[in-house]
Amino acid sequence: MERAMPKDKTLFFCKECGTEVSKWQGQCPGCHAWNTLVEAPAGQAAKLATKAVSESRKRAAANTGLKKKPVTIRDVETAADARQSVGMEEFDRVLGGGIVPGSLILVGGDPGIGKSTLLLQTCRMLSGKGIRTLYVSGEESEKQIKLRADRIGEFEDGMLLFSETSMSSILEAVDEVSPSVLVVDSIQTVYEESIDAAPGSVSQVREITGTLLQLAKSRNITVFIVGHVTKEGNVAGPRMLEHMVDIVLYFEGDKTAMYRMLRGVKNRFGSTNEVGVFEMREKGLVEVPNPSEYLMAGRLEDEAGSVVVCTMEGSRAFLIEVQALVCRSSFPVPRRTAVGSDYNRVNLLMAVLEKRIGLTLGDCDAYVNVAGGMRITEPAIDLALVAALISSHTGRAFDPKMVFFGEVGLVGEVRAVSQAERRIAEAVKTGYTTIIMPESNRIAIEKAGGINLGGARLVGVKHIRELSQMNRE
Ligand code: TYD
Ligand code: MG
């Protein structure tokens, strides 16, 4: 039976996140923003909260769907040949082979990571090819952008700058100059006058994105949106922005390390398993076509406690140095730290080492570090962590031309990991000669007919005991 609701009952909903509450409060219980609750008739609060997005979707649909008729799949023309290279191979790869005209691309990342630099360079490359680009910045003045641009290089006349935050002025500018590529830096600074919320709030971001979506689809303009990532790791709070755009890319990296990684999170025109690697230099971002060599630069060979792991980022393999320092503790409770790998995992592996091969680590401090500021979360790093810990504890280095990968279980067994062939290929390509890996992976490769090793050899291990033996030899 339906419960009758009094006609005049009202609810309160948050302008920022849409949370509904029955009583007014100063702070929204959903997103903890202050003074964002507004009153609305019951049953309409949710409607009001999602109105903006449904409206902009409707508008976009009306503009894109010129002929609404079912077609056979063979008749659908693909845009593959229409892809436009952005002039940077690393960027093109993440985009799935270049930009598809009319796509909406979100580039997210922490402040200061290099998003503006990346897009300014992209605009420079594109305008250099005669493509009209408009770079709208709500964060920096034209002078500031010019200062940055001067470091990057010469710019063509086809590249236009506009320092503006009002959406209607931006639309006017687009009308006037009709660019093929538009960059909006950043979505959090642009606002629509008709929306009663601060720039960067959910309703503003949603409305602006909706308008940009419509612009992209109706006029075939490629739109890049820059979004700062909040502490929670979301672009502008909710993930709804990601649903509205065609491509979501995250630009990340350790700010203290010089390398930057552009990662595809969503791509309606290609694979998301791609990463592009860049280095931040004096003159802007430089592509790093061979990250393994780059990340291994500066490694001291023949040092105890240093080993090399082959890890995967999407479909790309990287060789990275893993270091461990194990020493006698002078603290009542031994200290342990893990940089670039999971702290609990390191503790667990140390317990496995102690229990399964009798390594006395209980009264030792242990510091583990993944060099180059990379963060490895996949379990394939286990074997390298174990090898580094053993090597530091015994003071004996492993052969510097060894690469390790494999997951380690609680009884010390070495378990298979994914994409073993790719990892091996990367190690061989970079000049490593011995690959220490799970025996089950090695057998699988052998059964499948083997792979080209170019003189390198595969050593399958079943238990971490074998590693400790290898270290003694
Ligand atoms: P920026 O593109 O402004 O970051 P975001 O737009 O993501 O906030 O990049 C900022 C950092 O990059 C800044 O700390 C300075 C550095 N940088 C260089 O090291 N070299 C350069 O040539 C440029 C343009 C920036
Ligand atoms: Mg910026």
Image: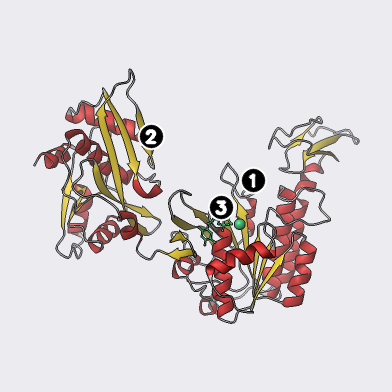
- Mark 3 and mark 2 lie on one chain; the one further toward the N terminus is 3
Residue drawn at 17 percent across, 45 percent down? 398
Where residue 167 sits, quadrant-wise, is bottom right
Name the spot of residue 177 as percent of width and height, x first.
73, 77
Where residue 116 sits, quadrant-wise, is bottom right
Observer able to see residue 306? yes
Please, is residue 244 above or below residue 79 in the view? above
Please, is residue 201 above or below residue 31 in the view? below
Mark linked to residue 237 = 1
Name the spot of residue 412 as percent of width and height, x first.
23, 35
Q: Is the Cβ of the residue at disc 3 closer than 8 Å to that at disc 1?
A: no
Q: Dividing the image into four quarters, tell me where ligand 1 lies.
A: bottom right
Residue sitting at the far right: 8
In the picture, the quarter occupied by the C terminus is top left
Left or right relative to 456: residue 240:
right
Q: Disc 3 on helix, strand or loop?
A: loop
Residue that numbered label 2 is attached to:
343
Residue that numbered label 3 is attached to:
112
Mark 3 near ligand 1 (CB under 8 Å)? yes
